[in-house]
Amino acid sequence: MKPEKLRQLMDEELDARVRELRDQIFNLKVKHSTGQLENLASLGVTRHDLARALTVKSERSRMR
């Protein structure tokens, strides 16, 4: 998700998105460890999305 779209989300929606991305990363790690993950790049993409969301969250906390 692009940072511009993340910045348009409300605080509650952004928190939900962070939780969702963390759950996705956990599930992808489990699939990778069991050998069921076919696309290894999806783990990296999800990590980057989480980093973007956390960056937007951090920017908001610094502005208050």
Image: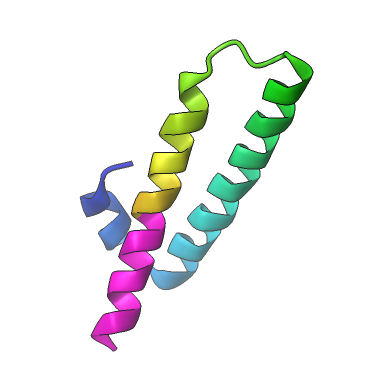
Left/right of residue 54 with respect to residue 5 in the rendered view: right
In the picture, residue 37 is in which quadrant? top right
In the picture, residue 36 is in which quadrant? top right
- x and y percentages locating residue 46 in the rendered image: 47, 36
Observer-nearest of 13 and 54:
54
Q: Which residues are magenta?
A: 53-64
What residue is drawn where x is 28% and y is 72%? 59
What residue is drawn where x is 46% and y is 62%? 13
Q: Residue furthest top?
A: 38
Left/right of residue 27 with respect to residue 12 in the rendered view: right
Observer-nearest of 42 and 10:
42
Observer-nearest of 47 and 16:
47
What residue is drawn where x is 54% and y is 59%? 16
- x and y percentages locating residue 29 in the rendered image: 66, 32
In the picture, residue 30 is in which quadrant? top right
35 magenta-colored:
no
Q: What is the magenta segment's predominant secondary structure?
A: helix
57 magenta-colored:
yes
In this rendering, the answer to whether 47 lies above or below 39 is below
Q: Which image quadrant: the N terminus? A: top left
- x and y percentages locating residue 15 in the rendered image: 50, 64
Q: Residue furthest right?
A: 34
What residue is drawn where x is 53% and y is 14%? 39
In this rendering, the answer to whether 53 lies above or below 41 is below
Q: Which image quadrant: the C terminus? A: bottom left
Q: How is the image coloured?
A: rainbow
